[in-house]
Image (cartoon, rainbow, N blue to C red):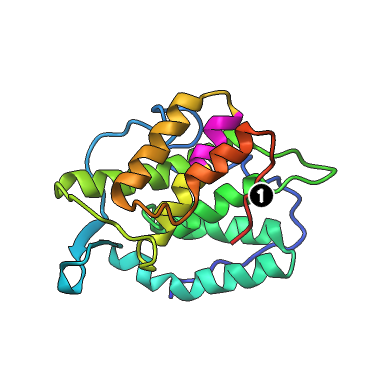
Amino acid sequence: MAKRRPHNPNHNRRPGQKNRPQGGRGGGPTGGGKGGGGSALGVRQLAGGSGWALVAPPCAAERAEDLEEVHAMIEAGELEIATDELRYLLSGCPELLAAHVLLGQLALDADETRPADIELARGHFGFAFALGEKALNAKNCPGPLPGADPANAPWHEAARGLAWCLEKQSQPIMADQIATMVRRFDPTDPAEVGAMLDDLRAGGLPIIELG
C-alpha cells in the first residue's frame, strides 16, 4: 500500500485543473502524448497458451488497496477527494492504468456546476491505451489479449473511453482505428467499443460509467 497523503475534504478544485498526468492534453493522435521510450508494463503468456496478459509494474500492486478505497469514495459521492487521491497515486506510479481510466471517467462526470472535460478524459484514456500498446509492440505480442482477464480489463476500458472521446471530438476515423485494434487483440470486443460507436452514430448516448 502506498504511503498516504492527508486529504483536504474542503477543497473546491475541479478535476483536471492541476496536476495533470503525463500525456495530459493534446500530444499524439490518441491524446496520450508522443513521449519516447517504452512502457514499464510487460506482457506474459497465459496458462495453456490461451492468450496474453499485461503485467503491471510492482508499484501498481502496491497501490491495489488504495484503488479499492478510491472506489469506495466514488460510491460515496466524494468525487473531488477521489480525484485528488488518484492523482497522488499516479505521481508515484504513472503506469497505473486503472487510475487513468477512473480519472478519465471522473472528467466526464458532468453536473449542473461542472461540464464534462472531454479533452482531459481523452488524455487519461489515451495515455493508458498507449502504455498498453507500447508494451504489446515491444514484445511483438500477437494476441489475443482477452478482456476477461483482470489484468487486461483496464486497457480495454481505456480503449472504450478513448474511442468515445474521439467520436465526440468529431474524429470518427481515429475512433474506428481504436475499435479495430481492440478487435485485433480480442475479437469479442469485451468493452463493446464497436457497439458504443454504433450507438453514438445512431444518435444514442452511451454512458461512460464510473468504475
Observer-nearest residue: 76 or 133?
Answer: 133
Q: Is residue 42 above or below residue 114?
A: below
Quarter in which the N terminus is drawn: bottom left
Query: Residue farthest to the right?
Result: 112
103 displayed left or right of 109: left
Magenta stretch: includes residue 164: yes
- Residue at 60% of width from left, 50% of height from top? 105
For mark 1, what is the residue?
A: 207
Image height check: is 209 above or below 195? Answer: below
Q: How many numbered marks does the figure carry?
A: 1
Residue drawn at x 63%, y 51% as measured from the top left: 106
**Residue 52 position (above or below residue 124):** below
Q: Is residue 154 left or right of residue 35?
A: right
In the rendered structure, the answer to whether residue 61 lies left or right of residue 17 reads left
| Secondary structure of residue under mark 1 | loop
Asked if one can make out residue 156 in the rendered structure from this viewpoint, the answer is: yes
- Residue 137 is situated, as x and y percent measured from the top left of the image, at 20, 43
The percent coordinates of residue 95 (x first, y second) are: 36, 54
Query: Callout 1: 10 Å neighbours few (<14), some, many (20+)?
Result: few
Whether residue 124 is visible, yes or no, is no
Q: Is residue 48 above or below residue 93?
A: below
**Residue 165 is covered by the magenta coloring:** yes
- The residue at 44%/40% (across/down) is 126
Image side of residue 74 versus residue 98, left or right: right
Instruction: Name the chief secondary structure element in magenta.
Output: helix
Q: Which residue: 30% across, 50% down?
A: 185
Q: Which residues are magenta?
A: 162-168
x and y, in percent, of residue 79 in the image? 69, 58
Q: Amino acid at mark 1?
A: Ile
Residue 203, image quadrant: top right
